[in-house]
Structure formats: C-alpha cells, structure tokens
Image (cartoon, rainbow, N blue to C red):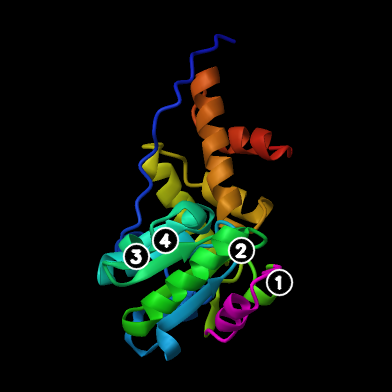
Amino acid sequence: MTRQLAFDLPVAETFRREDFFVSPTNAPALAAVEAWRTWPGGKMLIVGPRGSGKTHLAHLWAQETGATLVRATSLAEADIPSLTAGGPVAVEDAEAVAGNREGEAAFFHLHNIVTQGAALLVTAATPPRDWGLRLPDLASRLQAAPLTRLDAPDDALLSAVLVKLFADRQIAVPPNVIPYMVQRMERSLNTARKLVAALDAVSLAQGRPVTRQLAADILGRDG
C-alpha cells in the first residue's frame, strides 16, 4: 500500500457555547458555572477526569466574565498582582501545584486577592483534599469552596463530541462509524480526542478514508 506523508497540521479546537453539548452528566456543572454571581465566597471548583469538559467550561466562563485563564503549573513564576488586576481568574489543573512551595504560596495569594472582590474558578481532577497540599491555609480555603462534578460522558454526549472532533479536522465519516466507536471505546472525552487524532493520522499516512473498518483497526477489534 502506498503511504503518504502525514503533516502535523494544527487542529482548530473551539470552546464556543454552541459547541458545549449538554447532557445529564454535565448539566449540573454548567448550571453552577452560569450561576457564578451567587458562588459562596466568590469561588467554585469543577472536579472531573481529564477530558471531561473542564477546560471548555472554564473558557465559557472566561468569555462571559472576562476572566484570566492560568494553569496552576505557571503560578510559581506568575506576577500575581498583574494576573489578578483584571478581576476574575480561572486556575486550571490546580492539583499540579501541590508540593511546589512557591506555587502554593502564589495560589494562596491569588485566592485572597481574587475572592475579595471578584470570582475564582478552579478546575482539577480530584477534590483538594486529595492533592497533597502542604500549605494549610491554602488547603483549608480550597476545601471550603463549593464543588461541582463532571461525570463520565453518556452515549449522547460522547456521540456529539465525536461529531465535533471529526468536524474540527474536516473529516466526513459514514453514519455507522460513531455508534461503533461509542459502544467500544473507553467512556472518556480525552479518549475520544486521542481516537479521532489516531484515525486522522492513520488515514493520512495510509491514504485510507475514515471508515468503520479503520475504527475497528484502531480500537484493536474485529470489524
């Protein structure tokens, strides 16, 4: 079989409201984010597995509030006064700060500034009690924050996300591909992203269209 060069072209991942597909697994988290003006203490934690939609929700909130988005791993070197000057802040993958003395201190400083007059959104894979924070004051403040969870996607949500992921890559697939994938893949939006990326790469490299058989090959199952 003739092989083609597969170019690593950028994929346009969008975080628009119309691209956030609501289902029973994520509706409570969306409602909590939309009610940000009523958050107790001006803060909210979104907890869920990687690829569950936390980043999408954080971007939607930032678009509505003008919040600054920052990853927890960059807090140790961040200029906190400048970072918080614009008001609301969203800290993503917050558990990654645990054990970093400078990062935890910066997070504590950021928390105190933002929650005094604006709002703070925090995303993480697990609740703060499981992060291993060493700064007691930071741990107590985050553990006291209201928390909303994102669960594993149901069939409807997983199907809608796969449609979007293929569309982002401008890939047209036969109608039987997505139901086949949904019934056989791990129930994770992160897995959906990896599978679509793998299908795209193999399709380009081998000059094959994305079909049910190609999906079966990627999933390691019989067609």
Q: Which mark is residue 130?
A: 1
- Kind of residue indicated by mark 2: Glu
The picture quadrant where one finds residue 202 is: top right
Q: Residues within 10 Å of mark 2 (few under 14, many from 20)?
A: many
> What amino acid type should be assigned to the residue bearing mark 4?
His
The alpha-carbon separation of the residues under discs 4 and 2 comes to 18 Å
* Residue 97 belongs to magenta span: no
Residue 211 visible in the snapshot: no
Say which residue label 3 marks: 81
The residue labelled by disc 4 is 56
Q: CA distance from mark 1 to mark 3?
A: 28 Å
Name the N-terminal-most of marks 2 and 3.
Answer: 3
Query: Sequence-wise, which precedes: disc 3 or disc 4?
Result: 4
Q: Which residue is mark 2?
A: 95
Q: Earlier in the sequence, mark 1 or mark 3?
A: 3
First to last magenta residue range: 132-145
For the point 68% across and 76% down, the residue is: 129
Q: Mark 2–mark 1 contact, CB under 8 Å?
A: yes
Could you say where residue 161 lies in the image, as x and y percent from the top left? 47, 55
Left or right of residue 98: residue 54: left
Look at the image and tell me whether residue 101 can be seen: yes
Whether 85 is drawn above or below 117: the answer is above
Of circles 4 and 1, which is in front? 1
Q: Please report whichever mark, 4 or 2, sits nearer to the chain's N-terminal start.
A: 4
